[in-house]
Image: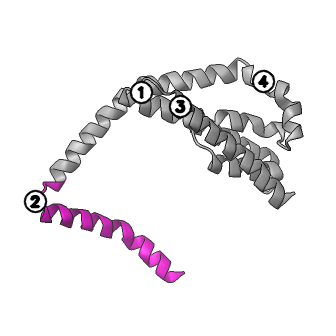
Amino acid sequence: MGWMNTVSIWVVPMLLLAVILHAALKQVPAYDSFVEGGKDGFQMAVSLIPYLVGMLTAVSVFRASGAMDLLIQAIAPALALVGMPAEIAPLAMIRPISGTGALGMMSSLLEEYGPDSFIGRLASTMQGSTDTTLYVITIYFGAAGVKHIGDALKVGLAADAAGVAASVFIVSMIFL
């Protein structure tokens, strides 16, 4: 294990050194390029703020209105048929929308049920097996000016559904 610690300590400095040496060999002004990239990144971040505010507002309204609770109550019997606890459904629903919201829900589930419980293991697996699809599409496609997101949205949500289904299946097979 000692060599792994040594390697991990030196990887980033060596990578930075390699980039600086490559820039010097190519006669590229590394610092000026870095500053220009940082400036472009900052401008991009500022342009993303309206999309981010819109998405976070929509998530907050959905949760605060009680619509999520009503939806979960309506689908609880179907969830039971596939072996998915109703307690995990809010995480499955919020994860494609908000990573921070999903992390908060997962933390609550871990506090309430414990990390070694079925629900805790399922929440952890689901968190790692799905993505923030709507968030990514809203932010990145909005920043790039992409208007037709239909196919990307379908594929992203299908991948999230597959991640949820695989999480339930695998955690059930391993831990039940």
| Callout 3 amino acid | Asp
Numbered disc in front, either 2 or 3: 3
Residue visible at 68% across and 21% down in the picture: 64
**How many badges with numbers are in the image?**
4
| Callout 1 amino acid | Gly
Q: Which residue is mark 1?
A: 142
In the image, the segment drawn in magenta is: 1-30
Taking the image as shown, residue 9 lies to the left or right of residue 73, namely left
> Nearer the N terminus, badge 3 or badge 1?
1
Residue visible at 83% across and 28% down in the picture: 75
| Callout 4 amino acid | Leu
> Nearer the N terminus, badge 1 or badge 2?
2
How far apart are labels 3 and 4 at the CA level? 25 Å
* Snapshot quadrant of residue 99: top right
Q: Residues within 10 Å of mark 1 (few under 14, many from 20)?
A: some
| Callout 2 amino acid | Gln
User: Element under label 3?
Assistant: helix
> Nearer the N terminus, badge 1 or badge 4?
4
Q: Which mark is residue 151?
A: 3
Q: Which mark is residue 27?
A: 2
In the rendered image, the quadrant that contains the N terminus is bottom right
How far apart are labels 2 and 4 at the CA level? 60 Å
156 magenta-colored: no
28 magenta-colored: yes
How far apart are labels 2 and 3 at the CA level? 43 Å
